[in-house]
Amino acid sequence: MSESKAVSLTRLTKVFDTATGPLQVVAEFTLDVRGGELLTLLGPSGSGKTTVLRLVAGLERPSAGAIHIGGVDVTHQAAADRNVGFVFQNYALFPHLNVFDNVAYPLRLRRTLPAVVRSQVDEILDRLGLHTLAGRLPSQLSGGQQQRVALSRALVMQPSVLLFDEPLSNLDAGLRAQVRAEIRRIQRAFGITAIYVTHDQAEAMSLSDRVAVMNAGRIEQVDTPNELYNRPRTVFVATFVGKVNVIPGVIRHADSRPVGMLLGQTFALRSWSGPLNDGGQAVFVIRPERVDMQTPGAGRVLQAEYLGALEEYVVELEGVELIVRRLAHPERAPLAEGDRVGVVIDHASVHAICGAGEAVPRG
């Protein structure tokens, strides 16, 4: 992957005029996307991720800030002049055009020579396994095939950057996993820079080189999926990216090394973000699969859920509720609500968010 900046967004702000007054949906948004990477904008509805995508595409104009694509300032360029491919949520295929003509449409719009159109469309349909479907209408295709046609139409333009706006939301769960793997394979094969928008955490984690977690129009953290999951910098990121236990605690220094104090236990602290002050308040982030149980114990099972391959529990201990997730075993009966259990935390996997000043979710 190239380290060049394929897309640079600098202090982007977008304010919409509404009946109740100005509404800021993107605020001082700064992000660099590297050449050849797939970067996902992940966040809840209303976090501004689709607006950022539309600003890059030129479908919206920023209220402030700058957009550079391939080192060129395109902030005030029309969408048609940006050489950006866009894969929409609803595919946006023309129902009266067959697969070939749908894919050829943007080339014909550019007045490309017919022989070049034929050559480029044939090549892209071959590479995406759609050549035998070239004469079919969209209504004669499955959801996954329609998605590949939409992707082919975006790629045939040889865009500088490819934008995806929740492209799998209309597919069922089984097909969604298959198509997202295909999107990742195709993106890598073409070596194209891509920005992908989703609110689905599993989708973001499985597809992305990096993920930018958004909240209220701003970036909370940009990192690899592994870093986001194991070393979140804010409580919002910790709680939005997968299930998690977030527990208040205290940091101490012992022999010049940080230790955490959690549920009456002291342990060597190996991972943290924020200022590490002796005696400072922190929240400890513990993923459910890093907590185990033993019987009997001082805790009590409040909720028990059998998920086939997994068992998931909520255990109350010393006034704190912990989510525990473990592999199911055919020779071990699942626990039931009310069972007394002890809790064993993998302290080496505990991450501390220090000096965050954020509210800690209860329960």
Image (cartoon, rainbow, N blue to C red):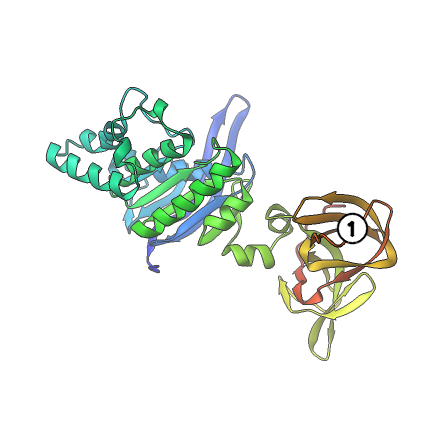
Quarter of the figure that contains the N terminus: bottom left
- Which residue is drawn at the image coordinates 39% and 52% (left, top)? 33
Task: Report how many numbered discs are placed on residues in the image.
Answer: 1
Q: Nearer the viewer, residue 45 or 168?
A: 168
Q: Looking at the picture, how far across and down is residue 343, in whole percent?
A: 80, 59
Q: Is residue 189 left or right of residue 213?
A: left
Return the residue at label 1.
333
In the image, 171: left or right of 190? right
Can the viewer see residue 329 in this picture?
yes
Q: Give the residue drawn at x 49%, y 56%.
A: 224
Q: Amino acid at mark 1?
A: Ala
Residue 348 percent across, percent down from the top left: 67, 67
The foreground one among 335 and 325 is 335
What residue sits 67% from the left and 56% below the top? 289
In percent of width and height, residue 38 lies at: 40, 50
Residue situated furthest front in the rendering? 331
- In terms of image quadrants, where is residue 353? bottom right
Secondary structure category for the residue under label 1: loop
Residue 206, relative to residue 267: is it above or below? above
Judge by depth and name the residue closer to the eye, 91 or 13. Answer: 91
How packed mark 1 is, by other alpha carbons closer than 10 Å (few <14, some 14-19, many 20 or more), is: few
Residue 102 vs residue 253, the one in the foreground: 102
Residue depicted at x 87% and y 46%: 338
Left or right: 68 in relation to 175 = left
User: Please, is residue 4 above or below residue 337 in the view?
Assistant: below
Whether residue 231 can be seen here: no
- Counting from the top left corner in percent of width and height, residue 273 is at 61, 62
Vertical order, 115 against 345 (above or below): above
